[in-house]
Structures are given as C-alpha cells and as structure tokens.
Image: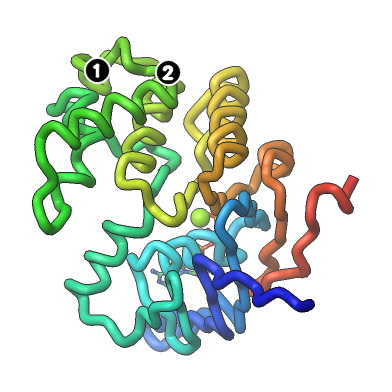
C-alpha cells in the first residue's frame, strides 16, 4: 500500500529573484525548487553572493520573489496581503540571526516573550510566563531570566535568541550564520544545541558558508549562482 507523502512545511516552486538597481539587473535566485518537511534540519551553503541571504529573506517573508510560488503549510503566500503575511510569519517562523538582534533595554524574559506579545488573540500572562520559562530551560539559561542581553556573553546571547525563536512554537526556525559572531567553542556549543533541538522535533533551515557547521545538519544543499544543487542526506555523504 502506498502512503500519501506528508505535506511539506515549506515549498518553493521555481523561485526567481531579480534585483534592479539603476538599470543593472542581478538574478540572485534562478529557479529554486525546495521542499522542507517537519523534523528536517537543512543547511544551505555556498560562496559569497550566491543568494543565501536572498533565499532566507524570501523564506522568512521579509521579501517577495519576482516569480515563482512559495507555500507555507500549504498556504500560498502570494495570495496574502502584508498584514496577513506578518501574521503568518509570526505564527509559523522563528528567526535566529548572526548578530543575535536582542533588545538591550529589555530583560531576557521580555526579549524571549516578545513574539508572543504580537499574538492575536492576546495570550494570557500565565501562559507567556510558562512558555518563556520552558524555552529558557531548553537553552539552559533560566538562571539569567532577569539579566539584560548586554550583561551576557555572545554564546549566551545566541542561546537567548534561540529561546525567542522557539517560544512561539513555529513550524520552522530560519537560522542565518548562527556562529558568525562567536568563537569556535561557543559556536560549537550553539550548533550542538540546534542539533539537539532538531533531534527533539524542531524543524530548522540554516544558511552558512562554513562547511564545518553545515555538517551538523541532516540534509545539506549547496546554492551556486542562485541555483540549488542536489540535496545530499548526511548518511549518504559520509
Ligand atoms: N537589495 C539588493 N539590491 C540589489 N542587489 C542585491 C540586493 N541584495 C542582494 N543583491 C545581489 O544578489 C546577489 C545575492 O546576494 P545575497 O546577499 O543573497 O548573497 P549571499 O549568498 O547571502 O552572500 P554572503 O555569503 O556574502 O552573505 C548578489 O550578487 C548581491 O549583490
Ligand atoms: Mg548573506
């Protein structure tokens, strides 16, 4: 008996992105097709200028493709207006950036709680408290709940950023060069934490130009001149 394949979390169909600046045309993405399924840990690597950030911006609904179709959980994002896209982003996507992007004027608790404060309908304070505490425990940072981000090390700040990405229980977390601002010891610790979260079910898509960190992913693909090369599952790559 054949099983119906599960619907992907993310589905990109023939995505093209063309930037036009002063009459100069740059084809940053040239027909990208990609499915990401629940539980995947995908790394996308490739040289500078190959289109990694462009692809991540489109996946994060921070930019729109020139042509092609982008579905999240089966929803065609091109049919949504800006507010609906923002709601979809808030509900389904968590972000971890190279530069942490935490707010120094707010406590660790408030930073992690932030994505929940945009939820409609409003989430009860007790539930926010419970979720934030749980996510800080997942990244082993409960003991720093009242600190400000600038009172923490880089590795600790990135763990807070991971907790903030987890708190909304998104369908997928997009990770952009998570170790770029960390020394190798903290970089390794953050990558080990991401791999552990994935083993516990979190779906991740990470962009990195560091082949050493791409090794932590389960599915790996390369972007070259705006085109995705074939995916290599890790087991077959070894
Ligand atoms: N806003 C923009 N306007 C015009 N061209 C852009 C813009 N953003 C990116 N590009 C161009 O699109 C191409 C892909 O850029 P992108 O930033 O996606 O590469 P990248 O793989 O993230 O590179 P890096 O590893 O250096 O961060 C490049 O040729 C870049 O110059
Ligand atoms: Mg980039």
- The percent position of residue 3, horizontal first and vertical second, equals 71, 74
Disc 1: CA contacts within 10 A as few (<14), some (14-19) or many (>=20): some
Q: Which circle's residue, 2 or 1, is located before the other in the chain?
A: 2
Residue at the image point whose x is 42% and y is 27% from the top: 159
Q: Quadrant of residue 166?
A: top left
Q: In the displayed structure, would residue 87 be above or below residue 33?
A: above
Q: Which residue is mark 2?
A: 140
Spatial distance from mark 2 to mark 1, Cα to Cα?
11 Å
Q: Position of residue 17 (x, y in %)?
A: 48, 80
Would the CB of label 1 be found within 8 Å of ligand 2?
Answer: no
* Label 2 near ligand 2 (CB < 8 Å): no
In the image, 97 versus 136, the foreground residue is 136
Location of residue 164 in the rendering, given as x and y in whole percent from the top left corner:
32, 37
- Residue plotted at (23% across, 65% down): 87
Quadrant, the N terminus: bottom right
Q: Residue at x 34, y 27 (%)?
A: 134
- Closest to the observer, 100 or 92: 92
The residue wearing badge 1 is 145
Q: Looking at the rendered structure, which numbered label has been put on residue 99? A: none
């Amino acid at each position: 008996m054949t099983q119906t394949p599960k619907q992907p979390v993310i589905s990109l169909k023939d995505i093209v992105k063309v930037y036009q600046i002063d009459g100069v045309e740059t084809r940053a993405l040239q027909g990208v097709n990609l499915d990401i399924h629940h539980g995947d840990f995908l790394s996308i690597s490739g040289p500078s200028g190959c289109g990694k950030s462009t692809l991540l911006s489109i996946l994060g609904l921070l930019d729109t493709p020139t042509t092609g179709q982008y579905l999240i959980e089966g929803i065609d994002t091109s049919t949504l207006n800006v507010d609906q896209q923002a709601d979809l982003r808030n509900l389904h996507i968590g972000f971890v950036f190279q530069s942490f992007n935490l707010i120094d004027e707010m406590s660790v608790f408030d930073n992690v709680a932030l994505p929940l404060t945009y939820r409609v309908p409003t989430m009860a304070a007790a539930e926010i408290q419970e979720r934030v505490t749980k996510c800080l425990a997942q990244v082993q940072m409960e003991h720093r709940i009242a600190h400000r981000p600038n009172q923490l090390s880089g590795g600790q700040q990135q763990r807070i950023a991971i907790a903030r990405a987890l708190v909304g229980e998104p369908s997928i977390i997009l990770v952009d060069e998570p170790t770029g601002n960390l020394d190798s010891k903290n970089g390794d610790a953050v990558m080990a934490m991401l791999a552990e979260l994935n083993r516990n079910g979190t779906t991740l898509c990470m962009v990195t130009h560091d082949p050493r960190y791409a090794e932590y992913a389960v599915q790996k693909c390369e972007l070259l001149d705006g085109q995705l090369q074939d995916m290599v599952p890790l087991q077959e790559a070894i």
